[in-house]
Amino acid sequence: MPASEDSRVFLLVLLILWMIVTPDSGSSNGFVSTPGIIAARVRRQRAAHGVLNSTKWGDFSPTSDTTPLVGDPGRYLNLTGFRQQDGLAWSDLEKFRETCRRWSTDVFYPTDFPQTDVDVDNGSERWGDWERGLKEDHAIWQNVTGTVHGEWVRRDPEVHRYAHDYNLSDIAPGLNWPGPGHEWGRNITGSHGKVVLRLEEDDDKPNDATKNGKDGEVGVVEGDGGWAREAAAVLTMQDEASGGSSWQMRVHGVHWPLQGALLLTTTSEKYAGIFGLPHLSPGPRFFETSQSLLNETIDKILRKKERSWIVNDGRNPWTSDAGDGPGEGNSPSPQCEYVIYLQVHPFSTQSLGDDVNPLLDPRAHSRWRSRMGIPAEGGEKAIVGVVEDELRNPTGAPIKEIPELRMSMVAWSPDCGFYLESKGPPSFSGYEGHRHLMGVKEEVQIYRIKMWILAMAAIVMGQIYLLKGQMRESSTPSTIGRVSFYTACMMLLADGLCFMGAVTLTLAGTHTFYPSLVLTFATFISMTVSGAFLADVWRIQEPERRNREPPTTRTRPTPAQTPMPAAQAAAAAAIQRDMPVIVPSDQDVDAEIAENTAAAAAAAATPILPPPATAPTTTTPSPTPSRGSVTTFQTITGRLVFVGIVITFLSLLATTWPTSIRSCYCNLIAFLYLSLWVPQIWRNVQRNSRRAYAWRFMIGQSVLRPLPIAYFYLLEDNILLAEPDWMSVLGLAGWLWTQLWILAFQDVLGPRYGIPKGWTAEAWDYHPVLREDNLEAGGLPIGLTSGEEPTSPTTLGRIRSDSLLGEATTAGFSGGTGGTAGDHGGGSGGGGARRREREKERERRGMHTRSIDCAICREVLEVPVISAGGGGGGGTAEGSSAAVDRGVAGVLARRAYMVTPCRHIFHTKCLEGWMRFRLQCPICREELPPL
């Protein structure tokens, strides 16, 4: 390698290293962050941890702005955001605690809680046994890892706060905060919306070493008020009343399993939420367990950061950023902070099975407890523990149905000043569907995702089966030429997007790896088979595309013709004069004379002797048409990949759009996807072909492909928690099946039935109305002309009555309805009378039937023909032709035969089967236009 190239490679490596280790503009986070910045941040966090460890319940007691006590300045903490000069709306803290206590007690029956007075530093509270976590007769999930969703409403606080009320440079100095006019993120201005919570926590349980706050396993602590462990959640908030914007944030906190309560908060540079979280808890016993737990867990994280301060990502471990971004950095954007209180609702163990109720059958209940491994003296919480163990490690326990996960929520923003409450009893009626936040545990959600993935794989395999059958049907150039290229493109594009999603699930999903691998394999096979079919369609239809392309004219020099000598001109005239005129078999003498004249001119143009070598030659440019560059199939593949990437990025971007716009986008994508038969309908009209795909393929694809869409549009508890939309799915299904009905009409009545002739290009009609005096169309087909001798003495040239034509043909010519042209009338009595009536009707309209042998199957073909000059009884040829052309039954009657441009006639099924393999007339081998 030359030295110049070595230097280029060296500079490129340095540039890449510089981009890795250098943070973004205004950010302190890189792969190797500045040690001074990291050390300063860790020191601030260590100081906040010291405040957490040294304070006690009641040290944070802000005064109320509405009813302040004279001479009471309140008590605050030396934490960012918890200081009095920071200006947060801490005067509403007691209201938040009261709301949390009320929501927790409303979950249970108030009479179930013996009330006792508990003396604390800041007064007297009536928590009772619930705060101690001693209730044993309620089944509450001890591990709340799962997903819940529901609706919320906004409540106004007593104290309002706005962005201009804060001086962020004083609250968190040393950072590049935006100007005072900057709008804060995560602010809720609407009155209602939706929320999705994805909670996660470990399965740690207390042991003897962790009781009473002793050192033991980090992550769980047990005390006088029960035990607590760490919890976190990703919250997706959607504000429907103000544009439908949505955003995500991550919150950290504590879960008290015995009480079913969770307290979560955000943490940022302007708000040390995790360090002051115990002081926000609803009671002193909650404070003790949460303080002991956070002291241990935060100390463990800080010690790890202090040991690895050289190479550190510099991110806040308790950041509210829900993504994997670099964090806040030195130029953070101010956002509203949140404190979230959740109360888990108890569930009925009767849903686990009929044997759970001891009142129905005590013996069956005893056997059920024995199979489940529940001790006889164990209460409902023992049943909950066994069910959770079965979910984590399935052993086939007799559980009929897993109860749902349900909880109520109270969210408070101390800096932006508003409350959010989940919609449910007692504020909202449960009969109207308001049941707070509903969902399922993680194990149930994973099971549902696995089942959906396997069902999706089965749907894709069904599509592959249908496509393979269609490829066997469309195996010749004639049948492939009928297929719409764009319909096949839409199917391939959908299969490619499914393959991309399956690969993503396989790489990202740990619990769904094997089902995702099955789906990846199925979508890959589907994409491969669809690509092969599309390649065949592209190759077969290439001449057709070239003919549609406008030719470009280019000139090339051609030798100029030298003047013909007088002797050669005289000889050519003599040849033309002496050439005899032979009368051809079709009696077209004028055409024979024109052909002889052209041949004589061509012969005269050829010199008898070559010109001498010294004769001068001149060249004149002559224009020659040439076609443009041909698009290759690789180019088409690249375009499909590009369209798929664009759709993927738009779909990811749509997750941040307002609800109305996102819903319109999803409906538009579904509408375009389910319009896959529209290009085929248009191609049938263009080519005048009735059907390209088999009905089994079209119906099967129309059933299988909308199923994944219908799952998200119809099922409320779908894996994406998408809101059902019955009106949209009914509209999409109606649109899809309308296309199938149009294809059916094209197959039965013809692709151009009802379409004005001026709207489409000229195409050969294989099912014309046959009239004896229609000379402009070439007359009757060969073998049906009255003056011709039949080639078969038994069948050709027979002119007889239409008694064998049947109900459909007669009804078709009379404008009625009936069967096909092959249905023969018969019978005696009433049948004979009806036959005589039909004969009279045909005679009145001037029609009769002629018979001929089909050259393919050698069977008799009966063809209805309109007599020349019209019929009797007031009927005219024009009226008969119009009745045949307009009536639906007349179109069905003409489907019995097909007439080629070379004036040969065959059975429809016979010629269609022949044209699947050859586009040549079976008799004269003349080229036939495609169907």
Image (spheres, helix red, strand yellow):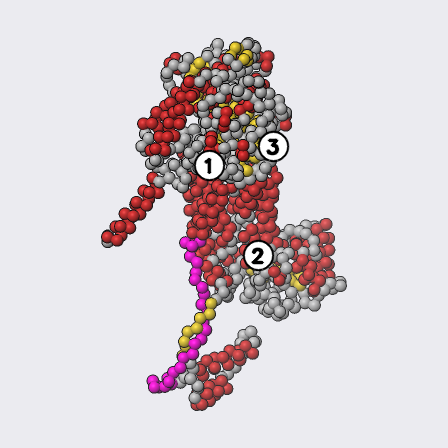
Amino acid type indicated by mark 1: Trp
Residue 160: x and y in percent read 58, 29
Q: CA distance from mark 3 to mark 2?
A: 53 Å
Residue picked out by circle 1: 177
Is residue 793 shown to the viewer in this render?
Answer: no
Q: Residue at x 40, y 79 (%)?
A: 619
Q: Label 1: few (<14), some or many (≥20) within 10 Å?
A: some
**Label 2: which secondary element:** helix
**Label 3: which secondary element:** loop
Amino acid type indicated by mark 3: Ser
Q: CA distance from mark 2 to mark 1?
A: 64 Å
Amino acid type indicated by mark 2: Val
Magenta residues span 609-636
From the viewer's perspective, is the residue at label 3 or at label 2 nearer? 3
Residue 691: x and y in percent read 55, 53
Residue picked out by circle 3: 191
Instruction: Pick whichever of labels 3 and 2 is earlier in the sequence.
Output: 3
As drawn, is 105 to the left or to the right of 885? Answer: left
Q: Which numbered disc covers residue 313?
A: none
Q: Which numbered disc covers residue 685?
A: 2
| Above or below 584: residue 29 | above
From the viewer's perspective, is the residue at label 1 or at label 3 nearer? 1
**Label 1: which secondary element:** loop
| Above or below 538: residue 80 | above
Q: Residue at x 56, y 53 (%)?
A: 681
Instruction: Pick whichever of labels 2 and 1 is earlier in the sequence.
Output: 1
Q: Nearer the viewer, residue 205 or 786?
A: 205
